[in-house]
Amino acid sequence: QIQLVQSGPEVKEPGASVKVSCKASGYRFSNYGMTWVRQAPGQGLEWMGWISAYTAIAKYAQKFQGGVTMTADSSTSTAYLELRSLRFDDTAVYYCARLGSNYAYPYWGQGTLVTVSS
Amino acid sequence: SYVLTQPPSVSVAPGQTARITCGGNDIGSKSVYWYQQKPGQAPVLVVYDDTIRPSGIPERFSGSNSGITATLTVSRVEAGDEADYYCQVWDSSTDHVVFGGGTKLTVL
């Protein structure tokens, strides 16, 4: 079955960087893109962007352009989200998600909590 | 950018029907997706393409979409349905995915 397994929680200081991973299994990784969604504490879901695992081309929500980088490694079936120059308000759970046969997301990782704290 | 508007909260007694709305400009021309999210868990897709339930989702969950409002209906509400619900569309003008702000369903 299709599984997305994310890396563990992170605690970082303001200004630092963090890289979250999402390892996929149960399907051909290069056939699908990977989306990243952010959820700040007590807040809603926020689409950050997605990356094509085939072309490695990423598309970012305007809010996140310049501050994040999405990459995909087909050799390990793993997608990555790097966040740079972390701020306190980057504290959130970050989810990876894969599309189904349309624009719905039936497959989600378990989420990775990134805490920015001094 | 495209905006989806949901009521922050909906409350309903067990056994009654809950209706959660999602408003957007001409949303009836788009496909709408609905997710259920319980505390500490990842979202779960409960309706896609406006009206279709993925396998494993109870028939009590149904969707509709017309004009400027899409609606998720939960019939015969149970305590286990208490969760946050999010609507989602794909905005073709920006090639971006958009989520509504979420609605907390409380079972009284």
Image (spheres, coloured by chain):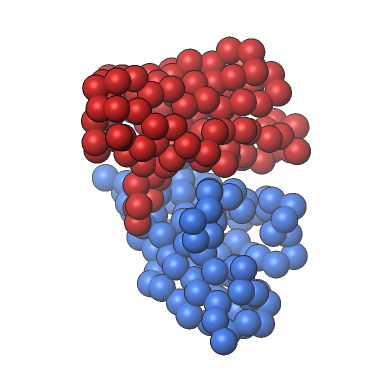
Chain colours: A blue, B red
Q: Quadrant of the C terminus of chain B?
A: top left
* Identity of the residue drawn at 46% across and 45% down: A98
Q: Is residue B30 left or right of residue B93?
A: left
Please tell me which residue lies in front, A53 or A12: A12
Q: Quadrant of the N terminus of chain B?
A: top right
* Identity of the residue drawn at 57% across and 41% down: B101
Image spot of residue A108 (x, y percent): 40, 49
Instruction: Examine the image and state in which quarter residue B40 appears.
Output: bottom left
Q: Is residue A111 left or right of residue B60?
A: right
Vertical comparison of A28 with A84: above or below:
above
Image spot of residue B30 (x, y percent): 61, 22
Please tell me which residue lies in front, A44 or A67: A44
Q: Is residue A83 left or right of residue B56?
A: right
Image spot of residue B51 (x, y percent): 43, 18
Vertical comparison of B75 with A100: above or below:
above
* Identity of the residue drawn at 54% across and 16% down: B65
Image spot of residue B64 (x, y percent): 48, 15
Please tell me which residue lies in front, A37 or B102: B102
Asked whether residue B97 is in view, the answer is: yes
Instruction: Examine the image and state in which quarter residue B85 appears.
Output: top left
Vertical comparison of B97 with B29: above or below:
below
Asked whether residue A94 is in view, the answer is: no
